Each structure stands twice: as structure tokens, then as C-alpha cells.
Image (cartoon, grey):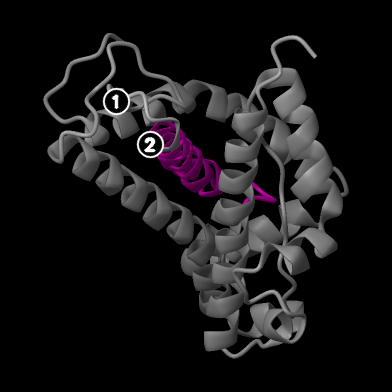
Amino acid sequence: MEGFDPVGLVLWGVAFLFSTTCHEAAHGLAAWWGGDPTALRAGQVTLNPLPHVRREPFGMVLVPLVSYALAGWMIGWASAPYDPYWAGRHPRRAGLMALAGPAANLALALLAIVALRLLVAAGVGFAPAVASFEHLLDVPSGDPLVIAGARLLSILACLNALLFAFNLLPIPPLDGATVLGGLGGEAVRRAYGQFLAMPWASFVGILVAWKVFDLVAPWIFMMVLSLAHPGVVYGG
């Protein structure tokens, strides 16, 4: 197929599976620490992607492949089981459980950015004249393995920064809604509970979140770029 990039497919697949697996494992780990072993018993508190893929094959495999074929990047979803009665009894713990997933993505984004900066400091690469999600580092050596590594780090930095920001939007069914409901007090929990009881709530929430995210995604990318290459000025 003309224009097909097998290396890009592999790199995006690795980045997506690893990032999503870390996100869901963090949810399960935080729930376990908070007293709910549901995800642990289901085998979801693991960095092995297979249990997560088995739980959500559509969101973890099919949708990412289709989105890559259509747009050149991957999007999808996964989930970790939890006890809703536990969450109802311990809303703050449930809020921390919800926060753990985006926090894992933030940690991955920062680690990838640090790795990119270390490569620059070591003289392996430098800030590109034109940057993109897959291209936050120019590698003058031409070594295909180093180029692929820099490309993977670029994808990990941008993808995880976007996952962090998107999932923290306080709109059901995203994690941010549970975080705000769990940590925002009884009035907020009651309001979110009434909204979630509506059959169309999740659909409307995703539509609103998608529109909001279209506005903030370019700013998130520019923030990642500025952290990867401080002092380098790029056009808006």
C-alpha cells in the first residue's frame, strides 16, 4: 500500500499499548492500595498488555489500527474493573484511583522529555527546525535505530501529555469527572451522580470533551516542545 509506514505502525503500537497499559495498571494499583482488589483479582494490575487487550480488544487493538490507517496516529481506550460499592463508600479513594491513570501518563511524558534532553546534551541529536508529534529530535548520524528511538520517545512524550490532559477533563465518563466528584465534596458528587444517571450522559460528555480537546491539543504540544527544547523558539 502506497505511503504505508510499517516502522511508524510498530512505534505507535508500542507507545499506545505501553501508555494505555500503564494508565490502567495505575488505576488498578491505586484501587488496591485503597482497599478494592477487584482489578488485582482480574489480573489488571500488570504492565503486561495482554490482560488489558483481552478486556478491551476493540479499544486496544481495532480502533487504534483503524485510526492509524486513517490519520497516521492512534487513539483508543481501555478500562480497569472496580467495585462501585467501594467507590460509593470511599469517594476520595475513588477520586485518587481515577487520578492515578492520568498521573502515570504524566510521568511517562516527563520521562520521555528527560530522555530527549539527555540525547541533546550528549550530542546525539538537536532541536528540529520543524517539529511534529513524531519528530521532536533531529538525529544527524542517520543510524536507523537511533532515529527510531528518537521517534518513539517523541511519540511517547506527546501521546502521554495528551492522554494526561484529555483524561483530566472534568467531563463524564473521563477520569477527571471521577477525580472532581471524589475530591470535590458532597455537592459535586451529587451533581455528577445525577448527570451520570442520564442514559445519554457519556455520549454527550465525549462529544463535549472532544471539542474542548481540539482547542487545547496544540497548546499541549507546544508545551511538550518547549520542555524538550527550552530556549528554542517555535512559531505558534
Magenta stretch: residue 156 in it? Answer: yes
Determine the image quadrant of residue 225: top left
Mark 1 Cα-neighbour bin, 10 Å: few <14, some 14–19, many ≥20: few
| SS state under label 1 | loop
The residue depicted at 47 percent of the width and 27 percent of the height is 134
Mark 2 Cα-neighbour bin, 10 Å: few <14, some 14–19, many ≥20: some
Residues at discs 1 and 2 in contact (Cβ within 8 Å) = yes
The residue carrying mark 2 is 146
The residue carrying mark 1 is 141
Magenta-drawn segment: 146-174
The tally of labels here is 2
| SS state under label 2 | helix
- Report the Cα–Cα distance between label 1 and label 2: 8 Å
Q: Please state which amino acid type lies under the numbered disc 2.
A: Val
Determine the image quadrant of residue 201: top right
Work out whether residue 171 or residue 9 is closer to the camera in this orientation and state it: 9
The residue depicted at 83 percent of the width and 63 percent of the height is 54
Q: Position of residue 191 (x, y in %)?
A: 64, 57
The residue depicted at 47 percent of the width and 53 percent of the height is 105
Q: Which mark is residue 186?
A: none
Question: On the picture, is 201 further left or further right than 100?
Answer: right
The residue depicted at 51 percent of the width and 76 percent of the height is 92
**First reached walking from the N terminus: tag 1 or tag 2:** 1
Name the dominant secondary structure of the magenta segment.
helix
Q: Please state which amino acid type lies under the numbered disc 1.
A: Ser
Tell me the quarter of the image containing the C terminus: top left
Magenta stretch: residue 180 in it? Answer: no
Determine the image quadrant of residue 44: bottom right
Work out whether residue 143 or residue 227 is closer to the camera in this orientation and state it: 143
